[in-house]
Amino acid sequence: MAGEPTAPVRTRPSGRVWLVAACAIGVIVFLAVVLPGVLDVKHSERTYVISAPIERVVFDSKGTAGVEISPSSDGKVHVLRKSSISRDSRLREQRHVAGKTLTLRSSCTGSRLGVLRRCDFHYHLRVPKKVALSVRVHFGRVTIHGIRGRLDFKSDAGDLVGYGCHARAYLSVTFGQIDYRDTCVPTIVHARVKGGDITLTVPAGRYDVHAARHAQRPFENIIQDPASRSVIDVGITWAGSIQIKGARR
């Protein structure tokens, strides 16, 4: 009948509309998943210098890391970082200076689909010779050469190797090895490994030694003296060996 309103005609989206929507979704997925990993690969090596006066360095790495720490010639912090990151992962690196403390953190995240592939770091840190170090790595090998200051080290799996002058050293490895030489008479060395070996070298002399049954006695050039102000406290939870040696100057 003339004058009566007609019902609206409902149409289904054409195939072309569906194609455009699918392409848009594909672009979003590419930007969210693939592109971040590609950008990280392009930045596989970086160097930078922290010129602010630093008295403490905190380093925290998640992933597989190789770390070398040695004194700088100018008293500044020099950082060289190399990385090998799979395309479906993303590198996160943060650095922050608060007062005279420098904090460096690095980690990898999986893709948007939650998959984590390759995440390998290698850091070479040159720091002031007199600096406190707090190093935390999940997996990898850490070498420390010639630093003077308090040392705090913790690793889930890997090795700590090196030498330095540390009045206080607190070393902890879940699975791996500690092979460290203190060139100064320490106030305390506290070392713990759940599964692995500990080799500790200190200047020859008198020490208040606390060592588990895994320790190989007698200790070379070490006089056990409970009254000594220099404490060596080492232990292994499950399996491994402990060697404590005194180095004559």
Image (spheres, rainbow, N blue to C red):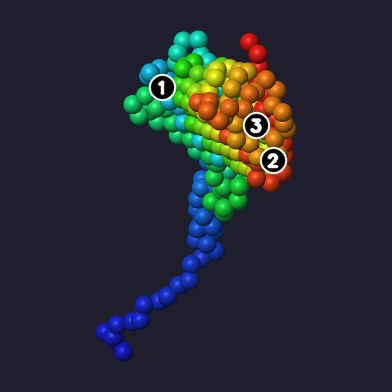
Q: Is residue 54 above or below residue 209?
A: above
The part of the image, by quadrant, that contains residue 208 is top right
Label number found at residue 213 = 2
Q: Are marks 1 and 3 in contact (CB under 8 Å)?
A: no
Q: Residue shown at 60%/19% (left/top)?
A: 205
Q: Nearer the viewer, mark 3 or mark 2?
A: 2
The part of the image, by quadrant, that contains residue 199 is top right
Q: Which of disc 1 and disc 2 is earlier in sequence?
A: 1
Q: Callout 1, which amino acid?
A: Glu
Q: Callout 3, which amino acid?
A: Ile
Mark 1 residue crowding within 10 angstroms, few (<14) / some (14–19) / many (20+): some
Q: Which of disc 2 and disc 3 is earlier in sequence?
A: 3
Please give left or right for residue 129 compared with residue 144 in the image.
Answer: left
Q: Nearer the viewer, mark 1 or mark 3?
A: 3
* Residue behind mark 3: 178
Q: Nearer the viewer, residue 192 or 141?
A: 192
| One can see residue 92 in this view | yes
Q: Residue 193 placed where, x, y %?
A: 63, 40
Q: Residue 166 placed where, x, y %?
A: 52, 22
Label number found at residue 55 = 1
Q: Residue 148 placed where, x, y %?
A: 50, 18
Q: Is residue 144 above or below residue 93?
A: above
